[in-house]
Amino acid sequence: MKKLQSLLPGVLSLLLSLIMLFPLYWMFNTSVLPTSEILSLNPSLWPSLSKISFDAYVSILHHTSILRWFSNSLNITLWSSVISMAVSIMAGYSLSRFRTRGQAVMGFFLLVNRMLPGTLIIIPFFIMTNSLHLLNNPIAVILANITAIVPFATWMMKGFFDSIPVELEEAAFVDGCSRLKTLIRIIVPLTSPGLAATGIYSAILAWSDFLFSRSLLLDSNQWTITVGTISFIGQYMVQWNSLMAMGFLSVVPMIVLFFLLEPFFVQGMTSGAVKG
Amino acid sequence: MNTKRSAVFAYGMLLPALLVVALLLVYPLYLALNASFRKGQTSNFSEINQLPFTLDNYQDMLADASVWRSLWISIQYTFFSTAIGFAIGLVTALLLNRNFFGRRLVRTLILVPWAIPSVVVSLGFVWILDASYGILNAMLRSLGIISTHIAWLSNPKYALFAVILPTVWKGYPFFTLMLLAALQSVPVELYEAGRVDGASKWRLFTHITWPGIRTAAILSVVLNGLWAFREFDFIYSMTKGGPMGATETLAIRIYNEAFSFFHQSSAAALGMMTFLLCIISALAIYPLIKEQFFGGTR
């Protein structure tokens, strides 16, 4: 009985997680089946192994611009994350170590950011982008992503810096290290879990962006993977296996990243920014 | 240490973040506010701030019954996606708070939906909910719950439910995470003491667990609610606000007004109202938020 009780939560939560992951499984399942199998009134939950084919994947690689969209997304995600992290590390450090008015200002804007409807802010973004002749330019989306990421990423970094004892820096100052040098050489390496957490937060937000890229990138050559994928919904004669293959491919980078960095992320969300 | 040089350093480090906020948040917000007071429409978004000043957009908005309908849809959408997400989040957090073999892996699996882009989640659900070949209809039919297939996305009666599903799926890991963090800070000794006193499981929950996670629960509900209230990705990619406006929340309406009908100024007015509603609901829990966002240094 005792043994059963200790096993139960594990079994239950594994079961629950499998149920919750069903949509992902179903996407994958559909992506590896031929159309004749998919358009069935009584779909089978398990594909018969003999029917599995990766034709849909081959087909989307040949017939759509998926590779182009993928590289656009990669480009935008990379720059959005790198710039956001640089900005957030600096701001987070400043907020953690000094008592300035910046504290209240950043707190206020983090709050505003949480309440501002994306569909409202996209209107002035469109106006600004248009007058700067940056429509169809990934720079516009990168800038928009940065605004969405920086406030919260700064708060996460501040939480991580808070957990590093000040004495470490003071020792470095005594040894004649400048403030900036201390930050780069001593403090930042110590917060690598923080960097991982902020990095995954930034990357996932930028990779998932739909509103900004959908509104600011009109040329299909510039589209990101999310905009490209969605452009196939509602078309006549939907090829469900191709569509699911596309959706599945587009989440693979984020799933891999998430599996690698999840512990840091959980730590960052729980110990740093969001105090219960 | 020289305090003046410290202050220069402190603000210098903060400068890029403040610039981002000023140029990409404050200025756009000013542009939007300005646009909401302009009369007429223009095909050129950039010229909108040269139109004459008016209060019409706000008057028309408040007099328009369909705006109030959108508000009601937003409220229903926010309420149900938050309530269901919270329930799943609480159950998963309570389970993950136990010690068992493989807990770390299961936690990662449970949190995965958070990492999936909203529009891909929508895509998966569009297929699951497909009227002819969707697995949901097939399952409900084989269980004998329905006899004819339901057109989840094109029937106005069911469309709102259909867009709530992916929202819940993507949203519950946030609750899991917040509640799990709070649960782990509840001292184990309290439970031991409770058990010694012969308290039932339910009493342990209401007297020890719940008081320990109450603050986190309220905070997460409000933050998730604010997120859902402004949500765009799911609804737009699944229904664009249709069928017949059944899923046209305020956030979707703003976008449609601005980018389908090119009524930028009335869209901006709607946006300002939505923003204001969010501020009001945040003010209601200001004491909790204050601690989180303005908490002192160290």
Image: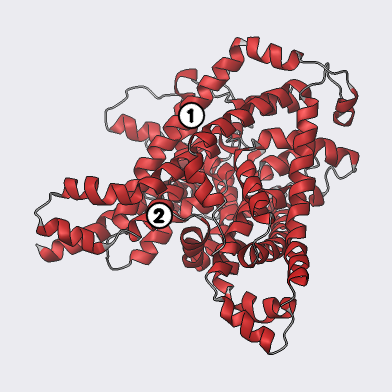
- The Cα atoms of the two marked residues, 2 and 1, are separated by 23 Å
Query: What amino acid type is highlighted by mark number 1?
Result: Tyr
Numbered label attached to residue B44: none
SS for callout 2: helix
Q: Is residue A175 left or right of residue B131?
A: right
Name the residue rendered at 29%, 55% in the picture: B95
Disc 2 versus disc 1: nearer the observer? 1
State the residue position of label 2: B110
Badges 2 and 1, same chain: yes
Classify residue B4 by image quadrant.
bottom right
Of residues A225 and A116, the one nearer the viewer is: A116
Q: Is residue A131 left or right of residue B175?
A: right
Q: Residue A236, position in %: x, y? A: 63, 30
Q: Is residue B13 left or right of residue B246?
A: right
Label 2 lies in what chain? B
Label 1 lies in what chain? B
Numbered label attached to residue B77: 1
Of residues A271 and B77, the one nearer the viewer is: A271
Rate crowding at label 2 as few (under 14), some (14 to 19) or many (20 or more) other CA atoms within 10 Å: many
Name the residue rendered at 47%, 62% in the picture: A271
Q: Residue B285, position in %: x, y? A: 48, 38
Q: Quadrant of the N terminus of chain A?
A: bottom left
Above or below, A98 relative to B260: below
Q: Tell me if residue B23 can be seen.
A: yes
Count of numbered circles in the view: 2
SS for callout 1: helix
Rate crowding at label 1 as few (under 14), some (14 to 19) or many (20 or more) other CA atoms within 10 Å: many
Q: Residue B126, position in %: x, y? A: 51, 35
Q: Residue furthest bottom?
A: A175
Q: Residue A138, position in %: x, y? A: 79, 51
* In contact (CB < 8 Å): disc 2 and disc 1: no
